[in-house]
Image (cartoon, rainbow, N blue to C red):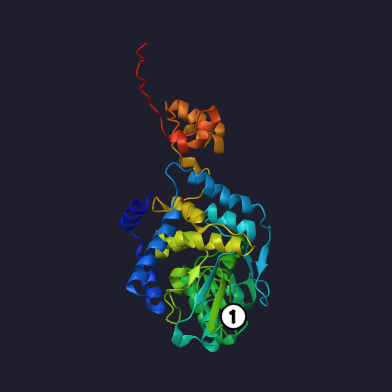
Amino acid sequence: MSGELQKDYLDEINLPESIRKKIEEVSREMKLKKEEVKKLETEVKKAYLACGFEPGEAIGILAAQSISEPATQMTMRTYHFAGSAGIKITYGLPRLIEIFDAKKQLETPSMTLYLKREFNNMETAKKVAESIVEENVEDLIKEISINLSERTIEMEPMDLRQLSKIARAIKEDIKDVKVRVKKNFIVVEPKEKMDFKELQKLKTKIMQVHVSGIKGIENAIVRREGEEWIITTIGSNLREVFNIKEIDCSRSITNDIHEVAKVLGIEAARNLIIEEALKTMQDQGLEVDIRHVMLVADIMTSTGEVKPIGRYGVAGSKTSILARAAFEETIKHLVRASLKNEADEFLGIFENVMVGQVVPCGTGMFEVIAKFEESSS
């Protein structure tokens, strides 16, 4: 491309707002002249153009290879926070599988909570951490027993100051029972007579009654990073945590993609997929181009909900019958396609490779039609 043509082409490129703001910021800091700013903008546009892909490039295959090849080097282990007994976060390959399979039930759901500037101190952090940990009746009682003669359930709390609090929680949660405090005990009496088996079921139900804290949060630890006090939890409930005045909602986050999509929206879920996937790989010294991870995140969230990369998600919803059959559940896809009288248009890479045809990417995208003039001999 000649200099003039390249200059005209670069002038037509519209850089994203974030990049333009960064150019303005750098220009102010460096006190650049008008000509220098123009030169910087041209160089940024060249770099931006180089980051694009050529028409017909198999970017899906490149992204898959870019992520999966280094992922084979990842360890199958869990990571423990130093100094916090019993707290572990899923790490390495199992976490990467959780992200790309978009699992709803995580092995170790967790949240990282930041405090607002005015509450950023150790005392407040510890107070908030203690207040959000879920406490059920079984966590607060010393002993629970069934009184067969009176057909009641009696329990003794570890802290007598919490007698009325536990009694009130049981009364609100379980209907058709009378709850009363008798000396140092809480007595639960069913309104209708129950046999021993039914009393055992009621006892189990009482043990699971929520008394205080936020449901789903099993544990919380406080740690310091630089000048900030951060709360890390095992268990997640982002919606409830955001109601706490000390918590900085703009920075606090969970590792549960589906919860983020529900509370903060699909764009936030997309960003979390990118951040968590990159962090998981970078923690083990693996470098992957962010654009490949972004492409996967875009595909997973393009429909407005989080879809896994798998038989019930992206791979299972491909238009090509042979591409679906090549992934998993071969017979199911072929039989279903034959019953529905479906046809494969051979527009993708997999199906063309399977039948030995030229793949429709790169130079294979185009058909060349030549018209030869007859020689006058």
326 up-or-down from 105: above or below: above
- The answer, for residue 256, to whether it is visible in the render is no
Mark 1 Cα-neighbour bin, 10 Å: few <14, some 14–19, many ≥20: some
37 up-or-down from 92: above or below: below
Residue 204 percent across, percent down from the top left: 59, 66
Residue 277 percent across, percent down from the top left: 55, 59
Residue 323 percent across, percent down from the top left: 51, 35
70 up-or-down from 33: above or below: above
Q: Quadrant of residue 141?
A: bottom right
Name the residue nearer the viewer: 68 or 288: 288
78 up-or-down from 323: above or below: below
Name the residue nearer the viewer: 200 or 32: 32
Q: Name the residue under label 1.
A: 223
Name the residue nearer the viewer: 319 or 362: 362
* Amino acid type, mark 1: Arg
- How many labels, in total? 1
- The answer, for residue 255, to whether it is visible in the render is yes
Q: What element carries label 1?
A: strand
Question: Is 246 displayed left or right of 109 in the figure?
Answer: left
Q: Quadrant of residue 270?
A: bottom left
Q: Say which residue appears at 56% left-offset and 77% top-offset.
A: 187
| Residue closest to the far top | 377
Quadrant for the C terminus in the image: top left
Name the residue nearer the viewer: 63 or 365: 365
Question: Is 105 displayed left or right of 375 in the figure?
Answer: right
| Residue closest to the far front | 377
Q: Quadrant of residue 240?
A: bottom left
Residue 363 percent across, percent down from the top left: 46, 36
